[in-house]
Image (cartoon, rainbow, N blue to C red):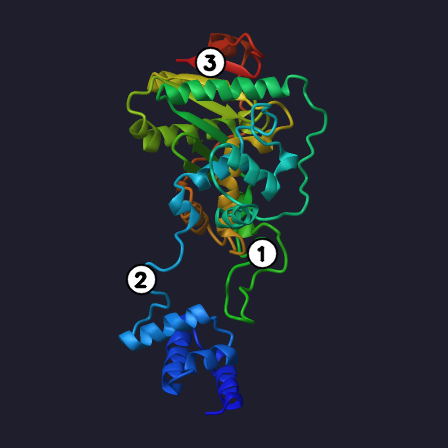
Amino acid sequence: MTEAGLREFLKTVEPHLNERQRRVVFGSMAEALGRGGQKMVAECSTMSTSTLSKAVREVRAGIEPSDRQRVEGGGDRPAIDKQPGLLLALDELVHPGSRGDPMSPLRWTSKSTYELSAALGAQGWSASAELVRRLLHQAGYSLQAPAKVIEGSRHPDRDAQFCYLNDLAADFVADGQPVISVDTKKQELIGNFSNGGREWQPSGEPVEVNDHDFPDRALGEFAKAIPYGAFDVANNQGWVNVGASADTSEFAVESIRRWWHTLGKHRFPNATRLLVTADAGGSNRYRVRAWKKHLAVFAAETGLTITVVHYPPGTSKWNKIEHRLFSFISKNWRGRPLTDMATIVELIGGTTTETGLTVKAVYDDTWYEKGAKITNNELAALHIRHHDWHGEWNYTITG
């Protein structure tokens, strides 16, 4: 075979070969050409001389048919296998205890891959900026457009409250006591409506949904789903109680009660205290009397001493449950019409992450009345101890 003919042959077949096939074909050709064959094949192809020498040795030794491209043991191990805990360490850097916590190793404005790489290096990990980028994608993060998260006026004690919350949570976890982050996820319309995002479908065959987002009149009062979540901070475990009537304080505490009886008391059999971190607004806001009354009833039922710590006003997006649970639920069902309650509960319960998040979801068909009034006497009868530091945000309730 002439050099021009060999060059044309290799140029034609090479794009159709995987790594193993290239070695078999090129190594066999070099052997068939005899003396000077390796040099000739190397000059007429893109294969390096070292790889070609390896290919010739494999051909001479006899190559058995196999689906494997590399020799056994070939290739480097993934970084997260060589450095167990690296992915979790990165996740903690991206989602520190709170956005405003001055003890957090990174601020919101410094989360570039280069600074994350440097921060990991300071902790003893080895991760380049490119590896950080790949791990972020692997963990479910992505570059995103600006969102409406500007907090407005900032409370002067915001950072100090974050520190107070984090210190309490650390004490509870160290003592083996449960710490849960609670909140209501955005209410969702039930029906064949468009749901933001995309999912894989056969080309040209998108799921067809209604061209409007008006509530289904046939469902009446049950045209929406109200997911209330409790996130077990220490165990990376989520619980979501999906109601259909109203987001009331009674519903919020009932969701916590169901978490406790289904998961909490089994996970923490020796618990005597419970720490609840909550927003400053919504059905669990610190000014709502019904929230405190129903918590007191729950405390009396279980014998638990319940401490509640609220995030400062305007900082609800930095509640743990938002970015450790709710964000992954939204990602799991994006692009899927939430056609009925069973679908919603199933999609929430099927949410997992590579960092070990598990979620259990149930449907709550109880009807919760709005507008419950708690009198001054009823409030005064509750066993509430307001903490010395911002007692309106931080308080402990016993039965």
Marks 3/1: CA distance?
Answer: 43 Å
Q: Nearer the viewer, residue 392 or 320?
A: 320
Residue beneath label 2, please?
72
**For the residues carrying marks 3 and 1, which lies nearer the camera in this image?**
3
**For the residues carrying marks 2 and 3, which lies nearer the camera in this image?**
2
Q: Mark 2 is on which residue type? A: Glu
* Residue 50 percent across, percent down from the top left: 43, 68
Left/right of residue 285 with respect to residue 235 in the rendered view: right
**Label 2 Cα crowd, 10 Å radius (few <14 / some 14-19 / many 20+):** few
| Location of residue 6 with respect to 159 vertically, above or below | below
| Image quarter hosting the N terminus | bottom left
Quadrant position of residue 58: bottom left
Residue beneath label 3, please?
396
Marks 2/3: CA distance?
Answer: 60 Å
* Residue 12 percent across, percent down from the top left: 51, 84
| Location of residue 301 with respect to 234 vertically, above or below | above
SS at badge 3? strand
| Image quarter hosting the C terminus | top left
**For the residues carrying marks 2 and 1, which lies nearer the camera in this image?**
2
Q: Which mark is residue 194?
A: 1
Q: Mark 1 is on which residue type? A: Ser
Which of disc 1 and disc 2 is earlier in sequence?
2
Query: Mark 2 touching mark 1, by CB under 8 A?
Result: no
| Location of residue 49 with respect to 275 vertically, above or below | below
SS at badge 1? loop
Q: Mark 3 is on which residue type? A: Thr
- Which residue: 36% across, 65% down? 70
- Which residue: 32% across, 25% down? 268
Q: Nearer the viewer, residue 352 or 391?
A: 352
